[in-house]
Image (spheres, helix red, strand yellow):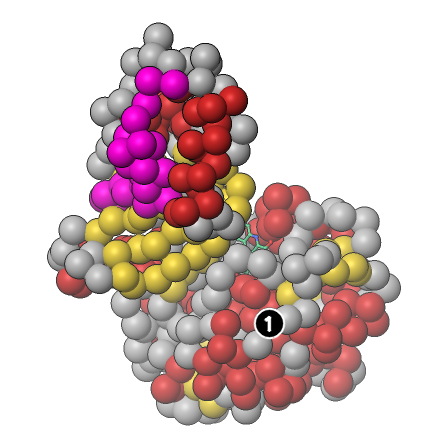
Amino acid sequence: MRKYNAAVVGGCAAGMTAAINAKRLNPELNIVIIEKLPRIGKKILATGNGRCNMTNLSAVASDYKNADFVEKVFEKYPPEKVVDFFESTGLLTYADSESRVYPRSNMAASVLDSLRFEIEGLGIDVICDMPVSEITKKNGGFEINREILCEKLIIATGGKSSPSQGSDGSGYSLAKQLGHSVTKLYPSLVPLTVKENVKPLKGVRARNVELTLKTDREIKKTKGELLFTDGGISGIAAMELAAAAEELLERVKQKTFTSIDFLPDMNLTQLIDYMLKLKDIKGYCSIDMLFSGILPKSLGIEICKACSLYKQEKKIARLNRREIINLAEKAKSFELEITGTKGFANAQVTSGGVSIEEINPETMESVICKGLYFAGEIIDVDAPCGGYNLQWAFASGLLAGENI
Ligand SMILES: Cc1cc2nc3c(=O)[nH]c(=O)nc-3n(C[C@H](O)[C@H](O)[C@H](O)COP(=O)(O)OP(=O)(O)OC[C@H]3O[C@@H](n4cnc5c(N)ncnc54)[C@H](O)[C@@H]3O)c2cc1C
């Protein structure tokens, strides 16, 4: 039986920062990271399309689920402190125009390396290829997989999204073994599936659209990029609706739609005026070209089809005023019925997790089980795209590490 002062189960964003902070603050601490995959930090490499959007300088607690809980953690570790932490490992960063922070190298591998080498330099033990499936309380501490004893324990096993990167939801059963409850889990930041046939639009990207999630009333709005896929929609604007859409479909069991405004920067009158002008100057063109000055051509064709106004040989000049108004309205509220999401396998984040009622946000220690701490996505906290989720993982990891 190997013995440690502290063990961290889960060696990725939250677990690595927790172990580093703990060891830096208490160099005498005999600490181990236990990871089920052959290497630590695999998911970091996949983040931000390989660039790792590490945090967001404008992230505040109200951007997150369970904001009051997050607030306490960010009082100690706001985004600037996370940036400082990485700088202290030698990693320099920059922020883009939307305050999203990336490594100067633009490579996620740099973020992982900065953590890996810090772990090595500090002499933190790392055990890989060890999926933890059993934790019991023993002599005031914990026994892990009947192989390792520790006095203090941090569970940082992530959620159940993207299981190919290790986070398969097994952490929830570890939390339950130690008396914790887990809230309902939904895949978040994941593509949506829709009822309509959107295959003709597969691969078409529309930038800066506005989406509204609705049943018989408006539920949520998002803005950003939209990408049509085989059976649905992806891109940041669509993915940010996913958890709310899943919850509606499951809990409320109501038909759920997304209304797409492809041109949120133009109001309806401006769009109608533009199209009437186009009728004058491009009237000789086929209807295929109607939206080609402002939207991808294939999208314009689908908008015409949705208004039953599409005939390839039809000229723009043949459209009457009523038809132009219908087309403009459709471009500003193109409805698709949501049937579901692409599930946890394709989700970037899990919404739901270990109940915040059972964790002290000043320390990240369990209020049920002394000596047990949580950090990262395993907790019932999540946020939109843009560096917010890693900010949470790093901040809660640093805080848990400080307190063991
Ligand atoms: C494709 C993709 C891109 C993303 N891009 C961004 C981005 O750019 N910016 C951003 O802010 N967020 C991004 N996210 C979300 C972000 O990566 C996560 O929120 C964050 O990694 C959560 O950190 P964590 O340490 O809590 O959990 P994870 O990163 O999921 O790490 C958990 C670790 O625990 C290990 N583990 C799990 N169970 C066990 C067990 N039983 N025993 C031992 N080890 C176990 C896993 O193998 C894993 O290494 C992205 C996610 C994905 C999937």
Q: Quadrant of the N terminus?
A: bottom right
Q: Quadrant of residue 288?
A: top left
Instruction: Describe residue 269's horizontal placement relative to residue 402 as left or right.
Output: left
With respect to residue 325, does 101 lie above or below?
below
Mark 1, other Cα within 10 Å: few <14 / some 14–19 / many ≥20: many
Q: Measured from the top left, where is residue 357 in percent x and y? A: 37, 86
- Compared across the picture, whether 312 is left or right of 225 comes to left
Q: What residue range appears in magenta?
A: 317-340
**Residue at (66% x, 59% y) in the render:** 98
Q: What residue do we see at 48% from left, 66% from top?
A: 383
The spot of residue 78 in percent (x, y) is 65, 79
According to the image, label 1 marks what residue?
59
Q: Is residue 291 left or right of residue 352?
A: right
Q: Position of residue 169 (x, y in %)?
A: 38, 59
Q: As rendered, which of 116 and 60 lies closer to the eye? A: 60
Q: Is residue 239 above or below residue 299?
A: below
Q: Secondary structure at mark 1?
A: loop
> Closer to the camera, 275 or 196?
275
Q: Nearer the viewer, residue 205 or 105?
A: 205
The image position of residue 294, as x and y in percent, is 52, 33
